Image (cartoon, helix red, strand yellow):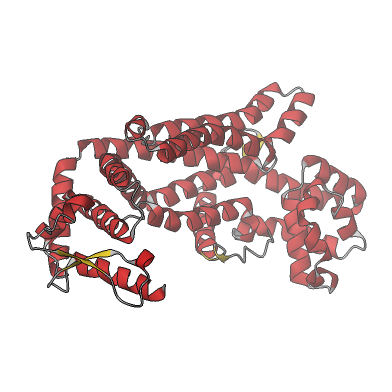
Amino acid sequence: MLLTKSSTFLIGHPIADILGMLMNGIFNVLYALGIQNTGLSIIGMSIIVFTIVIYMALLPLTIKQQKFAKLQSRMSPELQAIQNKYRDKKDNDSMIMMNQETKAVYARYGVSPTGSCVQLLIQMPILFALYQVIYNMPAYVTKIRMIFVELVNELMGVSGSAEFLQTFSSAARYSKQFTNEAFTSGNTEYISNTYIDVLNRASSADWTSLAQKYPEMESLINQTHNALINLNSFGGLDIGEAPRDLLMNSWQAGAYGLAIGALLIPVLAALTQFINVKLMPQQNSGSNRDNKNDQAEQMAQQMKIMNNIMPLMSAMFCFTLPAGMGVYWISGSVVRSVQQVLINKHIDKMDIEAVIAANEEKAKKKIEKEGVKAEELKKYSSLSTKALYNGKGADNKDYRKNTDNSSDTSSSEQSETYVSDDPNSLFAKVNMVKEYNNRKK
């Protein structure tokens, strides 16, 4: 990721830019309060406050998502009963009736068939942009960027400094930037950004080698490194470095307390996410067996496996990424867990039957507004396909069977239709589909 901010569509512009301004504001407020002089990392504290603000802003979407999950657990048996009812019926008539009955159930519970997808689609770009802002803070926080400017300007004036920076352990991920046309053509801003990208991810060993390579700049190099350490120091740990490197360096130096602290970051990341997963509403897969819904059972099992694997993956990523990302994941999981406990209490106190009744009344008014009688739709949702074909409709009107024996239809394509004098009846719509298919054949 280039220091000149993410250019990814939507995630980079405008979401990451807006979140970057928020992060910059939080950092400036904490800096004015003197957090950097308290022994706590101002960058770490900025990440924690930033995470809390973002997740609190997303709280209304989270509540909607959880309410949907609660209602879905109630209506799932009804939806499965409809699916089982039409399991072996693949004709157009049955498909239309199944869709009508399914829509009636969703309308009764007042939820959309897309469920919580809308909430997730809104949240995902924000969370991806949040990750980019935290991972690449010098691009968005002015005070952090200014720490590097003087040193970078000096290095850019020294021949061969770019080649030396490419030997850093942090330079591998930015290798394309060194060969980019903007870099080779001498674009000053691009070159400066590339230098800052590498130095921002440089390890303590890299900073030491830089001071040895350019002894005439040793004072400026140490000053820049110490300023960065002061911003990143969180209980003695440099959250700009990966816990893996912190663990090895601390253990070799005999600083066993710091080594344990470095190890705690990935462990806490996994533990807090595991707690967060356990607090989430869990689907009861036992009823799926009763309804012989093998696909739903498989999906539930896959989700269970994924929930168990994700905390372990978090620990692995936090062990190799800068510790600041671990701070973000831990604080995010803690905030989500607290929110989940409060949301669970709120939902448990809800009168679900009253919610369903209110939604059913809303659905009834909406249907009547569209010119369809709610009572008729309710009767349709309670009748089987076979019952509808007994010659009586949901409105008790007579429907007569009609076999298409027209001369342009072969005997193998002849099919029964149901004729009604009402052009707006469900049977009329079914027949329109049948007639279209016959003409197409």
The reply, left or right, for residue 320 in relation to residue 17 is: right
The residue sitting at the left extreme is 396
Place of residue 131 in the rendered image (x, y in percent of width and height, measured from the top left):
57, 51
The reply, left or right, for residue 149 in relation to residue 137 is: right
The reply, left or right, for residue 230 in relation to residue 102 is: right
Q: On the rendered image, what quadrant is the C terminus found in?
A: bottom left
Check the image and report above or below for 287 versus 7: above
Q: On the rendered image, what quadrant is the N terminus found in?
A: bottom right
**Image quadrant of residue 261?**
top right
Residue at position x 56%, y 33% in the image:
309
Place of residue 117 in the rendered image (x, y in percent of width and height, measured from the top left):
40, 54
Residue at position x 80%, y 52% in the image:
171
Q: Compare residues 41 and 277 and report the one nearer the observer.
A: 277
Place of residue 371 in the rendered image (x, y in percent of width and height, measured from the top left):
14, 70
From where the camera sits, is residue 299 visible? yes
Q: Compare residues 220 and 42 and report the one nearer the observer.
A: 42
From where the camera sits, is residue 36 visible? no
Check the image and report above or below for 343 versus 174: above
Q: Compare residues 40 and 263 and report the one nearer the observer.
A: 263
